[in-house]
Amino acid sequence: MKKIPLTVKGAEKLKQELQKLKSVERPKVIQAIAEAREHGDLKENAEYHAAREQQGFIEGRIREIEGKLANAQIIDVTQIDAEGKVVFGATVELEDLESGETVTYQIVGDDEADIKLGLISVSSPIARALIGKEVEDVVEVRTPKGGREYEILAVRYE
């Protein structure tokens, strides 16, 4: 099985979700199923079917998270001596050379990516272009809208 890279923060978030599913959501849906059963005929009992569907979703998500955590390679970027190079987990400040706009991204695992929070997937075109580069390097990123050039202004391991 291929190891899945995760930041410490990403792994913690998955562990919290797993804990909530097991300690809050699972018992709640089991209770809902029990209550729906008390209403009698299960064939036409919409509450029962909805609760069973919810239970299937919860159990599936629990298995998915447990699988991800079991195959995770948790990387603590604060413990890596990357000598100023862009690596998985690094936070990178960039300047778009065309617009002059600056953006900051952290390179994270596929499951953690959320562009609104500045978290980009390690497999994204921009992250692939940045890996191994350092401050003052200019990288060209091919996007569906064409090529863009960015200068790396800062690399942080936080």
Image (cartoon, rainbow, N blue to C red):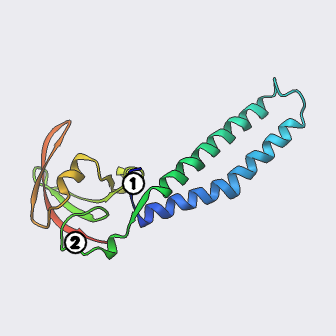
Q: Which mark is on residue 82?
A: 2
Instruction: For mark 2, give the secondary structure.
Output: loop
Residue 73 vertical placement versus 49 (above, below): below
**In front here: 112 or 152?**
112
Which quarter of the figure is the C terminus placed in? Answer: bottom left
Give the residue type at disc 2: Ala
- In this rendering, position of residue 80 left or right of residue 149: right
- In this rendering, position of residue 74 left or right of residue 63: left
Give the residue type at disc 1: Ile
- In this rendering, position of residue 104 left or right of residue 22: left
Dot 2 and dot 1 residues touching (CB under 8 Å): no
Q: Nearer the viewer, mark 2 or mark 1?
A: 1
Give the percent coordinates (x, y) of residue 114.
38, 51
Give the percent coordinates (x, y) of residue 68.
48, 53
Query: Residue 17 is drawn in which quadrant?
Result: bottom right
**In front here: 3 or 157?**
3
Q: Name which residue lies at 47% across and 62% down.
A: 11
- In this rendering, position of residue 117 left or right of residue 86: right
Neighbour class for label 1 at 10 Å: few (<14), some, many (≥20)?
A: some
Q: Which mark is on residue 52?
A: none
Give the percent coordinates (x, y) of residue 10.
44, 60
Residue 35 vertical placement versus 86 (above, below): above
- Alpha-carbon distance for marks 2 and 1? 20 Å
Give the percent coordinates (x, y) of residue 107.
30, 58
Neighbour class for label 2 at 10 Å: few (<14), some, many (≥20)?
A: some
Q: Name which residue lies at 57% across and 61% down.
A: 16
Q: Name which residue lies at 74% across and 31% down.
A: 49
Q: Which residue is mark 1?
A: 4
